[in-house]
């Protein structure tokens, strides 16, 4: 009977498809750390991690002290090792503490960093140039006697250059294989799934907002220096903190769950109040861009 003939792939073809699938999975696996590092850079958080295992460390106290030794800010890393810390412009010392752990690290330094983490803090000294969240990744050494992972248990990773080369060559090599096997629906299906995963990595998240708010002129959109920004507890109308904007007009507050309002004031401009009625998470970054309108100057009536 004449009709549509259904052909099934041979054993050798199936082995080739399996090898192609394994190769695509390997490309996705090897390039994942580069994508994860890119996401971390845009997260608005810093991370405390174990310099030996490269895993996040929870419940690490991170304190910021001025040059006189007075504590300016203190926070504790969460279960994912993330922390968020703000401070006014200035020069500080970072103190990191967890029982048995030491900072600065002996294994991860400015000159020697073979981890997956970038933007590391290799030494306690830090200079903050403006308001905003500190996003430095902090390596800490585990207690003495902790053994480095063996070859089989260590997490294998490539250098950034090699990962970039693999991520760029992956689609090209995959396209060449599909073209060679253009009559194979299995090869096409595998390659399309691979492209969907890669596309999902690129478009699966939105870039976060800046870790600071900016006070600006409503007309010129230029940042306003020396604007006074105050945050109040809305329930008791209690002043929590006062900041004066820098030359870039920046301010930032970190608050715990509750209800808050921010007042922004500057000479020659109308004051603005912003309400944050439902802050439902501790360590929330309270920021919003504010546009101030100039006060109308009264024009004197001409004398006749």
Image (tube, rainbow, N blue to C red):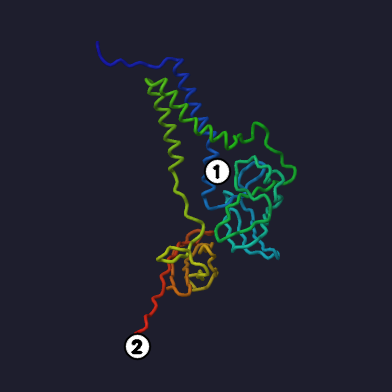
* Dot 2 and dot 1 residues touching (CB under 8 Å): no
Residue drawn at (44%, 23%) of the image: 177
Few, some or many residues within 10 Å of mark 1 (<14, 14–19, 20+): some
Label number found at residue 166: none
Spot occupied by residue 283 in the image (x, y as percentages of width and height):
54, 59
Circle 1 SS class: helix
Question: Residue reaching furthest front?
Answer: 304
Spot occupied by residue 152 in the image (x, y as percentages of width and height):
64, 31
Spot occupied by residue 196 in the image (x, y as percentages of width and height):
42, 35
**Is residue 97 found left or right of 281 in the rendered image?**
right
Q: Nearer the viewer, residue 130 or 48?
A: 130
Question: Residue reaching furthest bottom?
Answer: 304
Is residue 255 at least partly visible in the picture? no
Spot occupied by residue 130 in the image (x, y as percentages of width and height):
57, 60
Quarter the C terminus occupies: bottom left
Write down the residue under mark 1.
Answer: 37
Is residue 42 at least partly visible in the picture? yes
**Label 2 or label 1, whichever comes before in sequence order:** 1
**Is residue 147 found left or right of 292 in the rendered image?**
right
Q: Nearer the viewer, mark 2 or mark 1?
A: 2
Question: Residue reaching furthest top?
Answer: 1
Few, some or many residues within 10 Å of mark 2 (<14, 14–19, 20+): few
Circle 2 SS class: loop
Quarter the N terminus occupies: top left
Q: Nearer the viewer, residue 94 or 52?
A: 94
Q: What whole-number distance in Å separates the C-alpha atoms at marks 2 and 1?
A: 69 Å
Q: Is residue 5 above or below residue 265?
A: above
Question: Residue reaching furthest right?
Answer: 145
Write down the residue under mark 2.
Answer: 303
């Amino acid at each position: 009977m004449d009709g549509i003939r259904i052909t099934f792939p041979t054993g050798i073809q199936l082995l080739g498809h399996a090898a192609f699938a394994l190769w695509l999975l390997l490309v996705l696996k090897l390039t994942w750390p580069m994508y994860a590092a890119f996401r971390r850079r845009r997260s608005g958080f810093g991370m405390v991690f174990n310099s030996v295992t490269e895993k996040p460390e929870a419940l690490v106290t991170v304190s910021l002290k001025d040059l006189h030794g007075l504590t300016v800010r203190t926070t504790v890393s969460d279960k994912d090792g993330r922390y968020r810390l703000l401070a006014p412009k200035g020069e500080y010392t970072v103190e990191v503490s967890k029982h048995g752990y030491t900072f600065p690290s002996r294994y991860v330094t400015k000159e020697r960093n073979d981890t997956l983490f970038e933007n590391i803090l290799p030494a306690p000294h830090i200079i903050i140039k403006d308001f905003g969240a500190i996003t430095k990744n902090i390596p800490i050494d585990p207690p003495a006697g902790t053994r480095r992972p063996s070859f089989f248990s260590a997490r294998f990773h490539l250098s950034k250059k090699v990962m970039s080369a693999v991520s760029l060559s992956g689609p090209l090599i995959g396209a060449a294989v599909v073209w060679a096997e253009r009559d194979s629906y299995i090869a096409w299906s595998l390659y399309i799934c691979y492209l969907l995963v890669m596309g999902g990595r690129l478009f699966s998240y939105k870039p976060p907002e800046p870790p600071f708010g900016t006070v600006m002129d409503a007309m010129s959109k230029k940042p306003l220096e020396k604007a006074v920004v105050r945050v109040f507890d809305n329930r008791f109308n209690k002043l929590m903190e006062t900041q004066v904007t820098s030359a870039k007009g920046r301010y930032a507050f970190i608050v715990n769950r509750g209800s808050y309002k921010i007042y922004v004031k500057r000479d020659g401009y109308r004051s603005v109040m912003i309400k944050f009625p439902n802050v439902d998470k501790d360590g929330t970054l309270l920021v919003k861009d504010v546009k101030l309108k100039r006060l109308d100057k009264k024009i004197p009536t001409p004398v006749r």
